[in-house]
Image: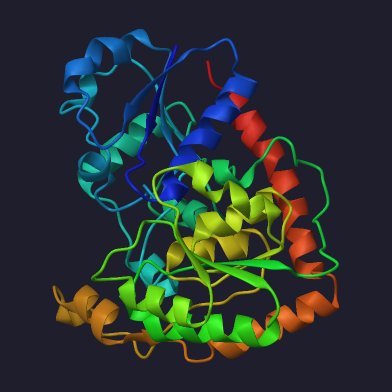
Amino acid sequence: MYVFLTRPFKNVGDFLIAEKGKQLLKHHKPEHELKEFHSAESLNDKIDILNESELIIINGGPGYQPQMYPKIYPLVDDLSELDTPIAILGMGWRSFPGDEISVNDFSFTKRSKKLLKLVNKNNYLSCRDYITQRLVKKNGFSPVTMTGCPAWYDSDNLERDLHVPNDIEKIVFTTPARKFYLTQSANVMKVLNDLFPNTKKYCTFHKGIRADKHLKIKERAEQMNYTVKDTSCDISKIEFYKDCDLHVGYRVHGHLYFLAHRLPSLLIEEDGRGRGANESLGLPRLPAWNRRVKISSNIKPFKKIINNLLFIYTNKFIPEMVKNLLIEEVDNDFRRIQQSVKIIDSTYEDMKKFIESFP
Protein backbone atom coordinates (compact mmCIF):
# COMPACT_ATOMS: atom_id res chain seq x y z
CA MET A 1 0.00 0.00 0.00
CA TYR A 2 1.18 3.51 -0.87
CA VAL A 3 0.06 6.71 0.85
CA PHE A 4 -0.70 9.18 -1.94
CA LEU A 5 -0.76 12.89 -1.06
CA THR A 6 -2.45 15.36 -3.42
CA ARG A 7 -3.35 19.03 -3.05
CA PRO A 8 -6.44 20.05 -5.07
CA PHE A 9 -8.55 22.92 -3.77
CA LYS A 10 -10.27 24.75 -6.62
CA ASN A 11 -7.85 25.04 -9.53
CA VAL A 12 -8.81 22.37 -12.07
CA GLY A 13 -5.12 21.96 -12.88
CA ASP A 14 -4.50 20.56 -9.40
CA PHE A 15 -7.32 18.04 -9.86
CA LEU A 16 -5.75 17.06 -13.17
CA ILE A 17 -2.33 16.53 -11.55
CA ALA A 18 -3.93 14.31 -8.89
CA GLU A 19 -5.83 12.20 -11.41
CA LYS A 20 -2.86 11.77 -13.74
CA GLY A 21 -0.55 10.87 -10.86
CA LYS A 22 -2.97 8.14 -9.79
CA GLN A 23 -3.21 6.82 -13.33
CA LEU A 24 0.56 6.59 -13.63
CA LEU A 25 0.90 4.70 -10.35
CA LYS A 26 -1.98 2.32 -11.12
CA HIS A 27 -0.44 1.57 -14.50
CA HIS A 28 3.16 1.02 -13.38
CA LYS A 29 2.52 -0.25 -9.83
CA PRO A 30 -0.89 -1.97 -10.17
CA GLU A 31 -0.24 -4.28 -7.23
CA HIS A 32 -0.26 -1.37 -4.77
CA GLU A 33 -3.40 0.08 -3.25
CA LEU A 34 -3.37 3.88 -2.98
CA LYS A 35 -4.47 5.43 0.30
CA GLU A 36 -5.16 9.06 -0.58
CA PHE A 37 -4.97 12.08 1.74
CA HIS A 38 -4.98 15.82 1.16
CA SER A 39 -1.41 17.05 1.51
CA ALA A 40 -2.45 20.38 3.09
CA GLU A 41 -3.79 18.55 6.16
CA SER A 42 -1.79 17.42 9.16
CA LEU A 43 -1.25 13.66 9.25
CA ASN A 44 -0.34 13.49 12.94
CA ASP A 45 -3.36 11.30 13.63
CA LYS A 46 -2.43 8.95 10.75
CA ILE A 47 1.12 8.01 11.71
CA ASP A 48 0.18 4.34 12.03
CA ILE A 49 -1.19 4.30 8.48
CA LEU A 50 1.88 6.14 7.18
CA ASN A 51 4.24 3.66 8.80
CA GLU A 52 2.26 0.66 7.62
CA SER A 53 2.62 1.80 4.01
CA GLU A 54 5.57 0.96 1.77
CA LEU A 55 5.95 4.50 0.49
CA ILE A 56 4.58 8.02 1.02
CA ILE A 57 4.22 9.82 -2.33
CA ILE A 58 3.86 13.60 -2.49
CA ASN A 59 2.33 14.17 -5.91
CA GLY A 60 3.03 17.03 -8.33
CA GLY A 61 2.09 20.67 -8.03
CA PRO A 62 4.38 23.66 -7.43
CA GLY A 63 5.49 22.39 -4.02
CA TYR A 64 9.20 23.21 -4.15
CA GLN A 65 8.83 26.42 -2.16
CA PRO A 66 11.03 27.84 0.62
CA GLN A 67 8.62 26.71 3.35
CA MET A 68 7.45 23.50 1.67
CA TYR A 69 7.61 21.83 5.09
CA PRO A 70 5.58 22.40 7.14
CA LYS A 71 3.69 25.30 5.47
CA ILE A 72 2.83 23.59 2.16
CA TYR A 73 3.09 19.99 3.35
CA PRO A 74 2.51 19.78 7.12
CA LEU A 75 2.88 15.97 7.13
CA VAL A 76 3.65 15.23 10.80
CA ASP A 77 5.16 17.45 13.47
CA ASP A 78 8.12 15.15 14.04
CA LEU A 79 9.54 13.66 10.84
CA SER A 80 11.67 11.24 12.87
CA GLU A 81 8.45 9.37 13.70
CA LEU A 82 8.15 8.30 10.06
CA ASP A 83 9.68 4.91 9.29
CA THR A 84 8.42 4.87 5.70
CA PRO A 85 10.41 6.36 2.79
CA ILE A 86 9.03 9.43 1.05
CA ALA A 87 8.97 10.13 -2.70
CA ILE A 88 8.25 13.38 -4.55
CA LEU A 89 6.60 12.79 -7.91
CA GLY A 90 6.89 15.39 -10.70
CA MET A 91 6.85 18.48 -8.48
CA GLY A 92 7.64 22.02 -9.68
CA TRP A 93 8.65 25.30 -8.12
CA ARG A 94 6.60 28.46 -7.84
CA SER A 95 8.02 31.94 -8.06
CA PHE A 96 7.00 35.35 -9.39
CA PRO A 97 8.22 36.41 -11.81
CA GLY A 98 10.41 33.33 -12.29
CA ASP A 99 13.53 34.72 -13.95
CA GLU A 100 17.17 34.03 -13.08
CA ILE A 101 17.02 36.55 -10.23
CA SER A 102 14.17 34.50 -8.75
CA VAL A 103 16.25 31.33 -9.13
CA ASN A 104 19.30 32.95 -7.55
CA ASP A 105 17.31 34.29 -4.59
CA PHE A 106 15.61 30.96 -3.89
CA SER A 107 16.51 28.87 -0.86
CA PHE A 108 14.76 26.32 1.35
CA THR A 109 14.24 26.83 5.07
CA LYS A 110 16.02 24.48 7.49
CA ARG A 111 12.82 22.53 8.12
CA SER A 112 12.18 22.11 4.40
CA LYS A 113 15.74 20.85 3.96
CA LYS A 114 15.08 18.29 6.66
CA LEU A 115 12.19 16.87 4.60
CA LEU A 116 14.24 16.93 1.39
CA LYS A 117 17.08 15.04 3.09
CA LEU A 118 14.61 12.29 4.00
CA VAL A 119 13.41 12.06 0.41
CA ASN A 120 16.93 12.26 -1.00
CA LYS A 121 18.08 9.39 1.22
CA ASN A 122 16.33 6.93 -1.11
CA ASN A 123 16.89 8.88 -4.36
CA TYR A 124 13.15 9.58 -4.62
CA LEU A 125 13.42 13.24 -5.65
CA SER A 126 11.85 14.16 -8.97
CA CYS A 127 10.67 17.36 -10.62
CA ARG A 128 8.56 18.50 -13.55
CA ASP A 129 10.94 20.86 -15.36
CA TYR A 130 14.62 21.61 -15.80
CA ILE A 131 14.56 24.92 -13.93
CA THR A 132 13.21 23.12 -10.87
CA GLN A 133 15.86 20.43 -11.27
CA ARG A 134 18.60 23.07 -11.38
CA LEU A 135 17.14 24.93 -8.41
CA VAL A 136 16.88 21.84 -6.18
CA LYS A 137 20.43 20.78 -7.08
CA LYS A 138 21.69 24.30 -6.40
CA ASN A 139 20.31 23.95 -2.88
CA GLY A 140 22.34 20.80 -2.26
CA PHE A 141 20.03 17.91 -3.23
CA SER A 142 20.92 15.36 -5.89
CA PRO A 143 20.05 13.26 -7.84
CA VAL A 144 16.82 14.89 -9.02
CA THR A 145 15.04 13.08 -11.86
CA MET A 146 13.27 15.29 -14.40
CA THR A 147 10.11 13.25 -15.00
CA GLY A 148 7.86 16.00 -16.31
CA CYS A 149 4.51 16.75 -14.69
CA PRO A 150 2.05 13.85 -14.33
CA ALA A 151 -0.32 15.95 -16.44
CA TRP A 152 2.08 15.75 -19.42
CA TYR A 153 0.91 12.22 -20.05
CA ASP A 154 -2.27 10.81 -21.51
CA SER A 155 -1.94 7.05 -22.00
CA ASP A 156 -4.20 7.01 -25.08
CA ASN A 157 -2.05 9.55 -26.88
CA LEU A 158 1.54 8.58 -26.10
CA GLU A 159 3.67 8.11 -29.24
CA ARG A 160 1.07 9.89 -31.37
CA ASP A 161 1.92 12.89 -33.53
CA LEU A 162 0.47 16.32 -32.98
CA HIS A 163 -2.95 16.75 -34.58
CA VAL A 164 -2.52 19.57 -37.10
CA PRO A 165 -5.99 21.00 -37.81
CA ASN A 166 -6.96 21.73 -41.41
CA ASP A 167 -9.14 24.57 -40.13
CA ILE A 168 -9.16 26.18 -36.72
CA GLU A 169 -12.81 26.13 -35.70
CA LYS A 170 -12.64 26.19 -31.88
CA ILE A 171 -10.14 28.05 -29.69
CA VAL A 172 -9.70 27.98 -25.91
CA PHE A 173 -8.25 31.02 -24.16
CA THR A 174 -7.27 30.41 -20.52
CA THR A 175 -7.21 33.46 -18.27
CA PRO A 176 -4.38 34.56 -15.96
CA ALA A 177 -4.58 34.09 -12.21
CA ARG A 178 -3.39 37.66 -11.55
CA LYS A 179 -5.47 40.80 -12.12
CA PHE A 180 -2.08 42.35 -12.99
CA TYR A 181 -2.51 40.94 -16.53
CA LEU A 182 -6.03 42.28 -17.19
CA THR A 183 -5.17 44.64 -20.05
CA GLN A 184 -2.63 42.28 -21.59
CA SER A 185 -5.03 39.34 -21.58
CA ALA A 186 -7.80 41.43 -23.15
CA ASN A 187 -5.39 42.46 -25.91
CA VAL A 188 -4.47 38.81 -26.53
CA MET A 189 -8.17 37.93 -26.86
CA LYS A 190 -8.50 40.72 -29.42
CA VAL A 191 -5.55 39.27 -31.37
CA LEU A 192 -7.33 35.90 -31.49
CA ASN A 193 -10.51 37.60 -32.72
CA ASP A 194 -8.60 39.42 -35.43
CA LEU A 195 -6.68 36.35 -36.62
CA PHE A 196 -9.58 33.91 -36.41
CA PRO A 197 -12.77 35.97 -36.87
CA ASN A 198 -15.08 33.07 -37.72
CA THR A 199 -14.09 30.59 -35.01
CA LYS A 200 -15.92 29.57 -31.84
CA LYS A 201 -13.92 30.90 -28.89
CA TYR A 202 -14.03 29.94 -25.21
CA CYS A 203 -12.65 31.96 -22.32
CA THR A 204 -12.08 29.63 -19.36
CA PHE A 205 -11.31 30.28 -15.71
CA HIS A 206 -9.43 27.34 -14.19
CA LYS A 207 -9.77 28.62 -10.63
CA GLY A 208 -13.27 30.02 -10.87
CA ILE A 209 -14.48 33.58 -11.44
CA ARG A 210 -13.78 35.85 -8.49
CA ALA A 211 -15.40 39.28 -8.59
CA ASP A 212 -12.30 41.01 -7.22
CA LYS A 213 -9.92 39.39 -9.74
CA HIS A 214 -11.71 38.15 -12.79
CA LEU A 215 -14.96 40.02 -13.38
CA LYS A 216 -13.44 42.59 -15.74
CA ILE A 217 -11.73 39.87 -17.80
CA LYS A 218 -15.08 38.04 -17.99
CA GLU A 219 -16.81 41.23 -19.13
CA ARG A 220 -14.15 41.90 -21.78
CA ALA A 221 -14.44 38.32 -23.06
CA GLU A 222 -18.23 38.56 -23.34
CA GLN A 223 -17.94 41.86 -25.19
CA MET A 224 -15.74 40.04 -27.73
CA ASN A 225 -18.28 37.20 -28.07
CA TYR A 226 -16.27 34.57 -26.20
CA THR A 227 -18.22 31.83 -24.43
CA VAL A 228 -17.17 32.13 -20.79
CA LYS A 229 -16.77 28.98 -18.70
CA ASP A 230 -15.91 28.41 -15.04
CA THR A 231 -13.89 25.18 -15.18
CA SER A 232 -12.85 24.99 -11.52
CA CYS A 233 -12.92 21.95 -9.22
CA ASP A 234 -13.78 19.21 -11.73
CA ILE A 235 -11.68 17.89 -14.64
CA SER A 236 -14.83 16.81 -16.48
CA LYS A 237 -15.39 20.54 -17.10
CA ILE A 238 -12.36 20.67 -19.40
CA GLU A 239 -13.09 17.51 -21.37
CA PHE A 240 -14.48 19.70 -24.15
CA TYR A 241 -10.87 20.83 -24.76
CA LYS A 242 -10.37 17.55 -26.65
CA ASP A 243 -12.80 18.79 -29.32
CA CYS A 244 -11.01 22.12 -29.78
CA ASP A 245 -8.26 22.97 -32.25
CA LEU A 246 -6.01 25.39 -30.39
CA HIS A 247 -5.22 26.70 -26.92
CA VAL A 248 -3.67 30.09 -26.20
CA GLY A 249 -3.45 31.44 -22.69
CA TYR A 250 -1.88 31.61 -19.26
CA ARG A 251 -2.85 28.38 -17.54
CA VAL A 252 -0.03 25.82 -17.46
CA HIS A 253 -2.38 22.87 -17.14
CA GLY A 254 -4.64 24.05 -19.93
CA HIS A 255 -1.46 24.10 -22.02
CA LEU A 256 -0.38 20.64 -20.84
CA TYR A 257 -3.87 19.18 -21.33
CA PHE A 258 -3.81 20.22 -24.98
CA LEU A 259 -0.29 18.92 -25.57
CA ALA A 260 -1.02 15.63 -23.77
CA HIS A 261 -3.94 15.17 -26.17
CA ARG A 262 -1.69 16.14 -29.09
CA LEU A 263 -3.39 19.45 -29.77
CA PRO A 264 -1.58 22.76 -30.48
CA SER A 265 -1.04 25.17 -27.61
CA LEU A 266 0.83 28.39 -26.85
CA LEU A 267 1.47 29.29 -23.21
CA ILE A 268 1.96 32.85 -21.99
CA GLU A 269 4.26 32.58 -18.96
CA GLU A 270 2.59 34.20 -15.97
CA ASP A 271 5.42 33.20 -13.63
CA GLY A 272 8.13 30.56 -13.11
CA ARG A 273 5.69 27.68 -13.59
CA GLY A 274 5.01 28.69 -17.19
CA ARG A 275 8.65 29.36 -17.91
CA GLY A 276 9.61 25.93 -16.63
CA ALA A 277 7.02 24.21 -18.82
CA ASN A 278 7.93 26.07 -22.03
CA GLU A 279 11.69 25.70 -21.61
CA SER A 280 11.46 22.01 -20.78
CA LEU A 281 9.24 21.29 -23.78
CA GLY A 282 11.40 23.28 -26.19
CA LEU A 283 8.64 25.78 -26.91
CA PRO A 284 8.90 29.50 -27.73
CA ARG A 285 9.13 31.76 -24.68
CA LEU A 286 6.24 34.17 -24.03
CA PRO A 287 7.06 35.92 -20.71
CA ALA A 288 4.09 38.00 -19.60
CA TRP A 289 6.31 40.25 -17.46
CA ASN A 290 9.51 42.28 -17.57
CA ARG A 291 11.83 43.39 -14.79
CA ARG A 292 13.34 46.87 -14.86
CA VAL A 293 16.29 46.48 -12.53
CA LYS A 294 17.86 44.25 -9.91
CA ILE A 295 17.96 45.83 -6.48
CA SER A 296 21.24 45.71 -4.59
CA SER A 297 21.39 42.90 -2.04
CA ASN A 298 22.51 45.28 0.72
CA ILE A 299 18.98 46.62 1.29
CA LYS A 300 17.58 43.46 2.87
CA PRO A 301 15.01 42.69 4.25
CA PHE A 302 13.12 44.77 1.66
CA LYS A 303 15.02 43.49 -1.37
CA LYS A 304 12.53 40.78 -2.34
CA ILE A 305 9.48 43.00 -1.83
CA ILE A 306 10.97 45.80 -3.94
CA ASN A 307 12.18 43.40 -6.65
CA ASN A 308 8.85 41.63 -6.96
CA LEU A 309 6.41 44.50 -6.53
CA LEU A 310 7.95 47.76 -7.66
CA PHE A 311 10.12 46.71 -10.57
CA ILE A 312 7.98 44.11 -12.37
CA TYR A 313 5.72 45.30 -15.15
CA THR A 314 3.68 43.65 -17.88
CA ASN A 315 5.30 42.83 -21.20
CA LYS A 316 3.51 45.14 -23.65
CA PHE A 317 4.81 43.13 -26.61
CA ILE A 318 2.96 39.92 -25.70
CA PRO A 319 -0.09 40.46 -27.97
CA GLU A 320 2.19 41.10 -30.96
CA MET A 321 4.42 38.15 -30.01
CA VAL A 322 1.39 35.86 -29.80
CA LYS A 323 0.14 37.11 -33.15
CA ASN A 324 3.47 36.52 -34.89
CA LEU A 325 3.94 33.08 -33.35
CA LEU A 326 0.47 31.96 -34.33
CA ILE A 327 0.95 33.10 -37.92
CA GLU A 328 4.31 31.29 -38.09
CA GLU A 329 2.99 28.10 -36.52
CA VAL A 330 -0.18 27.93 -38.62
CA ASP A 331 1.83 28.56 -41.80
CA ASN A 332 4.29 25.81 -40.86
CA ASP A 333 1.88 23.15 -39.55
CA PHE A 334 2.80 23.92 -35.92
CA ARG A 335 6.33 22.62 -36.51
CA ARG A 336 7.78 23.75 -33.18
CA ILE A 337 4.83 22.42 -31.22
CA GLN A 338 5.17 19.08 -33.05
CA GLN A 339 8.61 18.75 -31.48
CA SER A 340 7.25 19.33 -27.97
CA VAL A 341 5.12 16.17 -28.04
CA LYS A 342 8.21 14.15 -28.98
CA ILE A 343 9.90 15.54 -25.86
CA ILE A 344 6.88 14.42 -23.81
CA ASP A 345 7.23 10.89 -25.22
CA SER A 346 10.95 10.71 -24.47
CA THR A 347 10.50 12.10 -20.94
CA TYR A 348 7.85 9.47 -20.27
CA GLU A 349 10.62 6.87 -20.16
CA ASP A 350 12.19 8.72 -17.22
CA MET A 351 8.83 8.95 -15.44
CA LYS A 352 8.31 5.21 -15.98
CA LYS A 353 11.77 4.29 -14.63
CA PHE A 354 11.34 6.59 -11.63
CA ILE A 355 8.01 5.01 -10.63
CA GLU A 356 9.27 1.49 -11.25
CA SER A 357 12.13 2.17 -8.80
CA PHE A 358 9.57 2.40 -5.98
CA PRO A 359 9.36 -0.54 -3.56
Percent position of residue 338, x then y? 79, 61
Q: Nearer the viewer, residue 59 or 208?
A: 208
Task: Give coordinates of residue 176: x percent, y percent.
Answer: 42, 69
Asked if residue 102 lies left or right of residue 332, the reply is left
Residue drawn at (59%, 31%) of the image: 354
* Residue at the image position 27 percent from the left and 80 percent from the top: 307
Quarter of the image for residue 15 reads top left
Quadrant in the rendering for residue 162: bottom right
- Say which residue appears at 28% left-offset and 71% top-offset: 213
Q: Residue at x 29, y 51 (%)?
A: 108
The foreground one among 233 and 155 is 233
Q: Tell whether 263 sits left or right of 335.
A: left
Of residues 14 and 148, the one drawn nearer to the viewer in this rendering:
14
From the top left corner, tell me how far across and down residue 299 is, in percent: 16, 81
For residue 157, say whether it is visible: yes
Indicate whether 263 appears above or below 33: below
For this view, does 318 lie left or right of residue 111?
Answer: right
Number of residue marks:
0
Q: What is the x, y in percent for residue 150?
A: 56, 41
Q: Is residue 346 left or right of residue 52?
A: right
